[in-house]
């Protein structure tokens, strides 16, 4: 095998993120369905859980997690093609947007997939079963879809969407779409003339769910056509930026964050900072109650256990209860490291941008143990001083 293999499903949120990186970097790869027996028999035991996407390298190495997949592939790219910006503000903002894309946008993504059955289900049932049970008879495919969709439906509630609050979640998503549409009228990608981890992070929810599922797909085309175009662009293996003329293949000059992006950052501070603070506090509380945890131990004892209870926070003036996801601590630590990676002056510049957007609390939040990753699993990092304000 001389190519990469990406084990996926077309409907998978995180697969869309990894696929987009592979395509926009013209990397030779094939996609294989997670419903194939090779995936169940060889890949799942090696990774320790059923999870996609998984990248199989030409050397036969298996890599799970879109962050690790992009890191591994990006190591082969020249600096001018890297998904990681070189300058302090762009780098920190890219990490923030990657975190918000992969975690903060789960709420509208899951809502618009699973709460619009009349429009979505006929498509989803065929689409899911085609890759989860390739070649199976109709009854088996139906049963496979019923199993997968039941799991995901409960996940929707886990991200805080209830009947009472659904209208406000939709209004918030629309606000987001319009801000993003405005910004993508000024540049082909989030940080300028080429995609970064910010764009890949956004591609997870904005492709498979919000651009591809029938109900939200119409909404995006009608209300935010430039976002729709960006999704197409992010799935293209050529430079699909025709409407921008000779836009340079570079990020915004002078590490600038233009006003339309600042407006988007302001939205993220309203939507996501209180939730992240609650998540960090909940993980910290859990750790306080579990002093037996040791360095390097798999989080929650099993890689397939990905959440620990719930937490309630003030979401735009309304109490919202969501599941607590320790994985987010890893993403947050990466943001912290990025913000500090360009020296004290770099950190000052990043802090100024984060303060102006109302995102600065994110730079301070820290549980007593971070989450790290080892052997494709989330593990606990060493104990350190908690800096949470209680
Ligand atoms: N942090 C992981 C998340 C991957 C993930 O949650 N994938 C979903 C599909 S989009 C999955 O495999 N879910 C299976 C499950 O939760 O059982 C990544 O970035 O790769």
Image: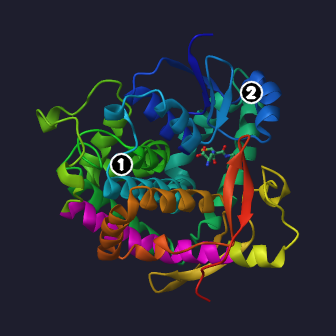
- Quarter that holds the C terminus: bottom right
Q: Which residues are magenta?
A: 259-282
In the image, taking residue 203 as reference, residue 146 lies left or right, namely right
Does dot 2 land on a helix, a strand or a loop? helix
Question: CA gap, disc 2 to disc 1?
Answer: 33 Å
Residue 67 screen position, x and y as percent:
55, 44
Q: How is the image coloured?
A: rainbow
- What residue is disc 1 on? 218
Q: Is residue 234 above or below residue 89?
A: above
Mark 2 vs 1: CB contact within 8 A:
no
Q: Residue at (21%, 34%) from the top-left corner?
A: 241
Q: Is residue 39 above or below residue 191?
A: above
Magenta span contains residue 142? no
Mark 2 or 1, which is nearer the eye?
Answer: 2
Is residue 247 or residue 37 the one in the foreground?
A: 247
Does dot 1 land on a helix, a strand or a loop? helix
């Amino acid at each position: 095998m001389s190519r990469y293999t990406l084990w996926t499903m077309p409907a998978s949120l995180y697969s869309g993120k990894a696929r987009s990186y592979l395509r926009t970097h013209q990397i030779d790869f094939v996609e294989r369905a997670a419903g194939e027996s090779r995936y169940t028999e060889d890949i799942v035991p090696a990774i320790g859980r059923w999870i996609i996407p998984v990248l199989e390298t030409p050397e036969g190495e298996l890599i799970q997690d879109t962050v690790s997949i992009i890191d591994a592939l990006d190591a082969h790219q020249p600096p001018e093609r890297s998904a990681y910006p070189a300058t302090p503000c762009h780098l920190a903002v890219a990490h923030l947007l990657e975190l918000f894309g992969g975690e903060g946008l789960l709420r509208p993504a899951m809502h618009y997939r699973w709460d619009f059955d009349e429009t979505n289900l006929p498509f989803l049932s065929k689409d899911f079963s085609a890759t989860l049970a390739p070649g199976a008879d109709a009854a088996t495919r139906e049963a496979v879809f019923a199993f997968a969709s039941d799991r995901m439906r409960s996940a929707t509630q886990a991200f805080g969407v209830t009947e009472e609050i659904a209208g406000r979640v939709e209004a918030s998503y629309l606000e987001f779409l319009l801000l993003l549409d405005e910004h993508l009228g000024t540049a082909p990608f989030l940080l300028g003339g080429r995609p970064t981890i910010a764009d890949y992070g956004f591609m997870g929810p904005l492709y498979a769910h919000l651009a591809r599922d029938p109900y939200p797909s119409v909404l995006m085309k009608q209300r935010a056509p430039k976002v729709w175009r960006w999704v197409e662009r992010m799935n293209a293996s050529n430079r699909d930026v025709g409407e921008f003329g000779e836009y340079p293949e570079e990020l915004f000059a002078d590490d600038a964050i233009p006003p339309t992006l600042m407006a988007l950052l302001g939205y993220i501070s309203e939507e996501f900072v209180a939730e992240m603070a609650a998540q960090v506090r909940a993980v910290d509380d859990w750790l306080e109650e579990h002093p037996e945890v040791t360095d390097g131990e798999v989080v929650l004892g099993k890689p397939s256990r990905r959440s620990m209870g719930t937490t309630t926070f003030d979401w735009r003036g309304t109490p919202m209860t969501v599941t607590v996801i320790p994985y987010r601590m890893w993403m947050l630590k990466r943001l912290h490291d990025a913000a500090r990676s360009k020296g004290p002056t770099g950190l000052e510049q990043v802090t100024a941008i984060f303060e102006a957007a109302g995102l600065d609390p994110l730079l301070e939040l820290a549980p007593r143990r971070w989450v790290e990753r080892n052997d494709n699993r989330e593990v606990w990092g060493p104990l350190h001083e908690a800096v949470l304000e209680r």
